[in-house]
Image (spheres, rainbow, N blue to C red):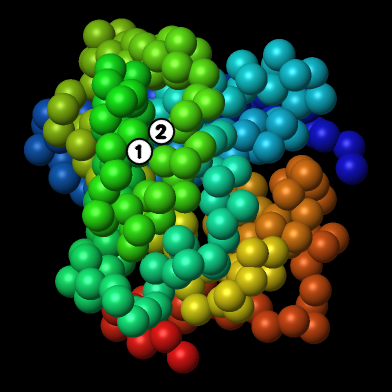
Amino acid sequence: MKIPGGLNVALTALAAAACCALLRIASHGASHGAWWLLALAAIAFSFTNNTMFSLLHESVHGIAHRNRRMNEIVGTFAAAFFPTSLSLQRLFHLGHHAHNRSDHEQFDYLRPGDRPWLKRAQWYSILTGLYWLFVPVGAVMFALWPSFFAKPFVAARQTGGASVFAFLDNAPRTRIRLEALFAIAVQASFFFALGVTWRGWLACYVAFAVNWSSLQYADHAFSPLDVREGAWNLRVNPITRLLFLNYHHHLAHHQHPQVPWLHLGRFVDGRAERPRFWRVYLSMWRGPRPMP
């Protein structure tokens, strides 16, 4: 499948410009008491920054651009808007593909021996957007104190941490530190160059955290317990699917992880079950279920 490299570079620039404009609008609205403007800008940012995340996701798989160096540039730049490190995200995400729906990633089911309170705490942190916070904080902590993640955590066995941390032994630490510094510099430029305020920034990133985090498990919740088939091709309106660069075609992605976003629709089986996003998302609020 042809990689739409030129289109992805253009989308990166366009989405980044939109994110910067919306951060400034949200800050301007907050400063002048126009709370409706702040709210609208934050909601719009939650979608445009998901476009940046989807471009980061393409780069993680090496399919944002056919030129390897340009692929890494797109991914590093897009990661700074999350903010996180491309290399760290690659380790985590490819680890997810390797362990999808395994014992380490059955967040939706309560198994014998699980601690229900811990499982539910993790579950509702995903639904409320708190899950997003662990990504930038984790990137900074790994850059400053990588040995922290080598410690055996009791909670790791029930939260997916065991599968994730196993990949960190071979992490490119110097590169991760440089990418984390770049992400911090980009975030700082929002305040010093664009005049973004903390109130505007928080509103936008809280909205993004909820929007991003809600999808991160809705596309897997209660799907078959299979590493390759354990995902959904979710039904959403075409505009949302376009802004997320077909991320909702998640089963097709797990079946064909090297297919660029532009072509994923060809691999969606129209005869298979395709639940609506809202149906899965709302059912998730009832909490994890006993293992069938």
Secondary structure at badge 2 equals: loop
In this picture, residue 39 sits left or right of residue 265: left
Where in the figure is residue 265, as x and y percent of width and height?
Answer: 78, 60
Of residues 117 and 130, the one drawn nearer to the viewer in this rendering = 117
Q: CA distance from mark 2 to mark 1?
A: 9 Å
Q: Earlier in the sequence, mark 2 or mark 1?
A: 2
Q: Which residue is mark 2?
A: 82
Where in the figure is residue 116, as x and y percent of width and height?
Answer: 22, 75
Looking at the rendered image, the disc whose residue lies closer to the viewer, 2 or 1, is 1
Of residues 192 and 183, the one drawn nearer to the viewer in this rendering = 183
207 in relation to 106, above or below: above
What residue do we see at 16% from left, 27% from top?
198
Of residues 8 and 161, the one drawn nearer to the viewer in this rendering = 161
What residue do we see at 20% from left, 36% from top?
202
In this picture, residue 134 sits left or right of residue 270: left
Where in the figure is residue 82, as x and y percent of width and height?
Answer: 40, 33
In this picture, residue 78 sits left or right of residue 255: left
Identify the amino acid type marked 1: Val
In this picture, residue 268 sits left or right of residue 8: right
Q: Quadrant of residue 225?
A: bottom right
Of residues 76 and 35, the one drawn nearer to the viewer in this rendering = 76
**Number of numbered tags placed on the structure image:** 2
